[in-house]
Image (cartoon, grey):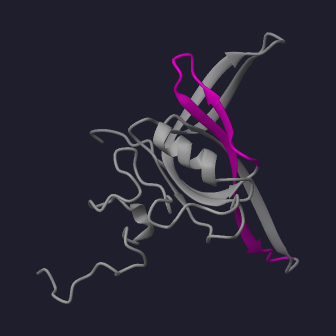
Amino acid sequence: MAGSVNKVILVGNLGRDPEVKFSQDGVKIVNFTMATSDTWKDKNTGERREKTEWHRIVVFNEHLAGIIERYVRKGSKIYIEGALQTRKWTGNDGVEKYSTEVILNRYRGEMIMLDAKGSGGDPGPLAPPDSAPTGGGSSDSSPGDSSPGGSGPSGSGPSGGPGADLDDEIPF
């Protein structure tokens, strides 16, 4: 294999409100935990079973950090793309400890809010639809950007619902 890939895609709910911190040089950093769950029916008992995994998420992308700070709350359902990174440190007891996190770096990573307006983690009234971010996007495009990929994988364009900006003519 010529190279390698470190990419994580998660769809889940926030376990707590995002925590906003600032680096020594004033860059906004957001931390939060995210739960993903798998459900199945137990073959032996017929009971419905569920297993929840918790993930630590760290956002170094200032654009996404600002959106998360304003619009995402505990219980919000989001889609994120990032990379795994393991940190090592020595605790107060002298024991080496490890923590694996999903990192959304400055020029990589995406976040899309999946909750409908007025549900789950909605913090209250939002700005008008033309100025409020409806989803994430990569750090090098804004949510209202009409360039390919600017509206993220949600498929809706900046003018509203899916297909709202399609012409009658097929371009091929």
Q: What stretch of residues is rendered in magenta?
A: 16-44
Residue lying at the far left of the rendered structure: 172
Residue lying at the far front of the rendered structure: 128
Q: Nearer the viewer, residue 141 or 16?
A: 141
Vertical arrangement, residue 54 with respect to residue 23, above or below: below
Percent x, y of residue 33: 70, 45
Percent x, y of residue 165: 29, 78
Residue lying at the far top of the rendered structure: 94
Q: Main secondary structure of the magenta part?
A: strand
- The reply, left or right, for residue 62 in relation to residue 23 is left
- The reply, left or right, for residue 111 in relation to residue 33 is left
Percent x, y of residue 38: 70, 65
**Does 41 appear in magenta?**
yes
Name the residue rendered at 58%, 66% in the picture: 114
Vertical arrangement, residue 109 with respect to residue 169, above or below: above
Which image quarter: residue 36?
bottom right
Q: Nearer the viewer, residue 72 or 7?
A: 72
